[in-house]
Amino acid sequence: TSRRPLIIDGRSYPTDAWTNIPPPILDHYGRKLHVQPNHPLSITRKLIESCFPEFQHHNALSGVVTVDQNFNSLGFAADHPGRSRTDTYYINKDTLLRTHTSAHEVDVFRSNTSNGYTIAADVYRRDAVDRTHYPAFHQMEGALTWDRNHFKTTDDFLHHLSSALANFKPPNVEVEDANPPFHPERNPPQEKHHSPEEAELVGAHLKRSLEHMVVTIFTEADKALQSSGLELTAEDKDPLKVRWVESFFPHTSPSWEMEVWWRGDWLEVLGCGVIEQPLLIRSDVPSRVGWAFGLGLERLAMLLFGIPDIRLFWSKDSRFLSQFDENKPIRRFQPFSKYPAAPRDVAFWLPKSGPVVAETPAATSTAPSPAGGKQTEPTLDTAPAFHENDLMEVVRSTAGDSVEDVTCIDNFKHPKTGRQSLCYRVTYRSLEKTLTNEEANSLHEQIRQELVTRFGVELR
Ligand code: PHE
């Protein structure tokens, strides 16, 4: 069978055995929600940009990138799970829809037009289906670097960093930094490239900058909550807290995650770290050192505005869009009435010889993976295993935004035959209308048949 090229942004791309982008994903490509006037994602982006007034802000970088840009240039190991076709949307073996804004780091560093930058953009990941995950979403990242050659001596540079640090007003929140700044194995400083003082000061500058940013954002969220007229619980009045947790990214070391205590929960807000020096060397700016962070815009916008379902960001319904005004203080979203949910279960046996179900994989960036892997071209996995993300894709391609959630509710291995049986609950609920029983049944039946055709499962 001949493969048809994919047309994206008016350009034609050849397809091959790697191609795995279903049409609904391409329908989302190009909406540019993060720059639509008065869109909550755009308002959130601007609020973050306002925390870094001196930075250059990039908001129009193309979402079609190479495997090199998205993975190799950042030092992702050859076997990093993020590279697999179950996690990433490939146009062809060399080209994909970016899975994170970091895909542009090397290009932006190489252009060397500013010390600091932010990038906001749409990103794509094959992922679970629930109220906080959607295969197309938005990230924002920022970085700040210093050119060590701009300073006469090393001491001048260290002195510059220390006085920059002294300029930070202490954040008016409690900050827990239980981790020592470095861990010799798990989170090492880059001793080959950075003096201990340098690494320490850059890391501290990163933390103070992001604490400042997060306090700005959550102060707005708090104001919106206080003026919402909602009845506040004790948890709503609990003061904001911040904590730093060790983390792992191929492109930073040491790395941290920032978590924020808000309304009774620790929330993961962003990932960050001291930029891997080899990355800056590859970008032809070897004398620069600095830090970078990345965050999910939907996550923050959901908290800021109280938006309950991630599908709403794509809504063209004026009951949603008319609630946001970038020239007014942030106000809580007033949910319009929810239509009823229609849960349906699907149970099936995996094919006898079938491989074991892969676990829901960790997110592209956070999955630890041994550093220093060879950067070879990824190879196509031969046996098409049943992977949960493939089921998610079948659901999305068949029922689209009429599904709110897909959850595995039973996973059972027959003691005698060794066969594995799975049961998933698919919750149908449209944001736009009440689904009739017939509509839900018909969508569900299509999904069941598609599972048989695609994976040879035996329905129970
Ligand atoms: N790229 C990381 C992600 O997708 C986020 C990140 C950006 C981490 C920059 C560190 C520095 O989650």
Image: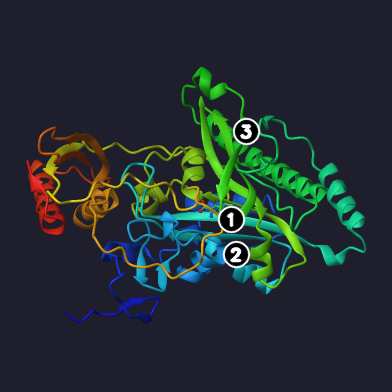
Residue 289 drawn at (x, y percent): 74, 59
Local SS, label 2: helix
- Report if the beta carbon of the residue with label 1 is closer than 8 angstroms to ligand 1: yes
Report if residue 47 is visible in the image: yes
Please name the amino acid that badge 1 sits on: Glu
- Report if the beta carbon of the residue with label 2 is closer than 8 angstroms to ligand 1: yes
Please name the amino acid that badge 3 sits on: Arg
Q: Which mark is residue 255?
A: none
| Circles 1, 2 touching at the beta carbon (< 8 Å) | yes
Name the side, left or right, on which 17 lies relative to 170: left
- The image quadrant where one finds the C terminus is top left
| Mark nearer the N terminus (3 vs 2) | 2
Q: Residue at x 56, y 36 (%)?
A: 221
Q: Residue at x 61, y 29 (%)?
A: 240
Badge count:
3
Q: Residue at x 72, y 46 (%)?
A: 203
To which residue does mark 2 refer?
105
Report if residue 62 is visible in the image: no
Local SS, label 1: strand
Please name the amino acid that badge 2 sits on: Glu
- The image quadrant that residue 244 belongs to is top right
Q: Residue 243 carries which label?
A: 3
To which residue does mark 1 refer?
141
